[in-house]
Structure formats: C-alpha cells, structure tokens
Amino acid sequence: MTLLTLKKLRLKYGEQTIVKDASFSLESGDFACVVGANGSGKSTLIKGILGLIKPAEGEVIYGEDLDRTKIGYLPQDIRQDANFPATVEEIVLSGCLGHMKTRPFYCRHEKQHAAESMKMLGIENLAKKSFSELSGGQRQKTLLARSLSATKQLLILDEPSNNLDYKSRKEFYTALKKLNGNGLTIIMITHDLDADDLIGNKVIALENGTATIAKIEEYLEKYK
C-alpha cells in the first residue's frame, strides 16, 4: 500500500531553491534512509513532507490511511533540556499532546500507547526515572518513544544517531529495526554511509537538488 507520494516537489527558502525535484513513493512498511552531502537539502525535504515548508511547485500526497496530524517526528535540533524536571513517562506521554485538542487529561488509550512505546524500546523500567539521570542513549530512546506516542504509521527522524557513542548508536538502530519489523514506516536522515548503518530497505539520495530513490542493494552497488 502506498503511504506517501512526492510529485515533482520543489522547495525553496526565500528565493533560493534547495530541492528542485523530488519524485518518489514510499510503501507502508518501508524504511528509507535519506542521504546526501551537507547542505544538499535533506532536512528541507523532510520539512516539505511534514508540511512545515510550503512547496514552490509539485505536491506531497498522503495515502488514504495516513493521518498527517499523527506523523511522529524527531528533529535534529530538539530542544530538550537535560535537566528538565520530568520523568521518562511524562516526556513519552507528551507525544500524545497533538491528539488531545481541548482535552486536559490523557485518556486510557494514550497512556497504553505510551507504555507500549517504552516497552518496545526497552525503557519501561525507566518510566519513573528523571530525564536528567539518564545516559545519552537512554535520553535518545526516551525522545524516540515520545515520537512513537504520536504515531503507529510513519516515523520521521533527522540524524537521530548524532552525539551517540558507538554502543548507543547500535542499540538505537536495533530498536529502529524492531519497530520497522512491527510494521512502522520510517524515514531517517543519516550521515552514516557505511553499509552497516544503512539499515533500511531503501535509500533516498539527494544530489544537486534532485532526490532519487533506490533499494539499498542498488545504492551500495552503485557507490561501492
């Protein structure tokens, strides 16, 4: 089932065109790594998909089963103070805020979804622990769990392994592969171009403002 389609998408900042042509589709269950040189437009492309940047031309078409208000997003420049006085559970639950509209309290379904997100990432034992007491890897998993609380369909990540050590990065990637194996569609910007770090099934490559898509094997064969 097609979850997302981009048709001749062109994205600009002011008068400058950053992405001049992005045309591809993603199917439900895909795990696509977005790659490209610094300044190639990776984050701009993601913001275009999310609707944070209005297209100069072209369009983003969401599949019938994809609610664009329930896309999980973990940006690169997330502003979560390490000393923020909240527990892991409270931070993960905050991912449901976009669903609540005018409701003042979380419902049972949202609490259950947050609990499932923590369990899926192996941090349910940290639920009552303060965010300030966590390691870097644990904090990143907590923020990922918060993003998961917003969606069961599409998760978008902007270089989530930044500032993680080797062990934490591998654990984080293992968690992402598990989530994808459970049916979650993932789009992830990465600067890690080793074969072991291209962990999905597709690559979206940005070069000279043009986005092309290929299977992981095809991409590695072309650039090895």
Image (tube, rainbow, N blue to C red):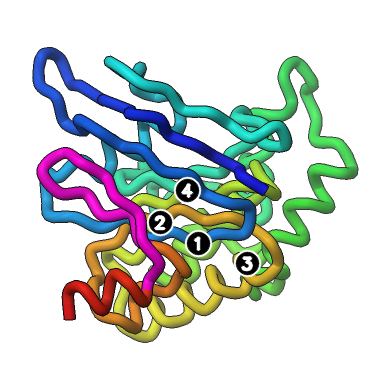
How far is the residue under mark 4 from the one under mark 1? 10 Å
Q: Is residue 205 magenta?
A: yes
Q: Is residue 113 left or right of residue 143?
A: right
Say which element carries label 1.
strand
- Between 172 and 214, the residue placed more toward the observer is 214
Q: Does any portion of residue 123 appear in the rendered image?
A: no
**Residue tagged by mark 1?**
31
Q: Looking at the image, tell me whether mark 4 or mark 2 is earlier in sequence order.
A: 4
Residue 188, disc: 2
User: Badge 3 is on which residue?
Assistant: 179
Name the residue that disc number 4 marks.
Answer: 156
Occupied quadrant, residue 170:
bottom left
Q: What whole-number distance in Å separates the C-alpha atoms at marks 2 and 1?
A: 8 Å
- Amino acid identity at mark 3: Leu
Which image quarter: residue 11?
top left
Q: Earlier in the sequence, mark 3 or mark 1?
A: 1
Q: Which mark lies nearer to you, 2 or 1?
A: 1
Helix, strand or loop at mark 3: helix
Which quadrant of the view contains residue 37?
bottom left
Locate residue 9, reporting x and y percent: 33, 28
Left or right, 122 with respect to 6, comes to right
Q: Please provide percent x and percent y for residue 97.
A: 66, 31
Q: For the magenta stretch, what is the residue range? A: 203-216
Q: Which amino acid does label 1 sit on?
A: Phe
Question: Which residue is painted at 10% across and 21% down in the image?
Answer: 16
Dot 4 falls on a residue whose secondary structure is strand
Q: Is residue 68 left or right of residue 80?
A: right
Question: Is tag 2's residue or tag 1's residue first in the polypeptide sequence?
Answer: 1
C-beta proximity under 8 Å, tags 3 and 4? no
Tag 2 near tag 3, CB within 8 Å:
no
Q: What element carries label 2?
A: strand
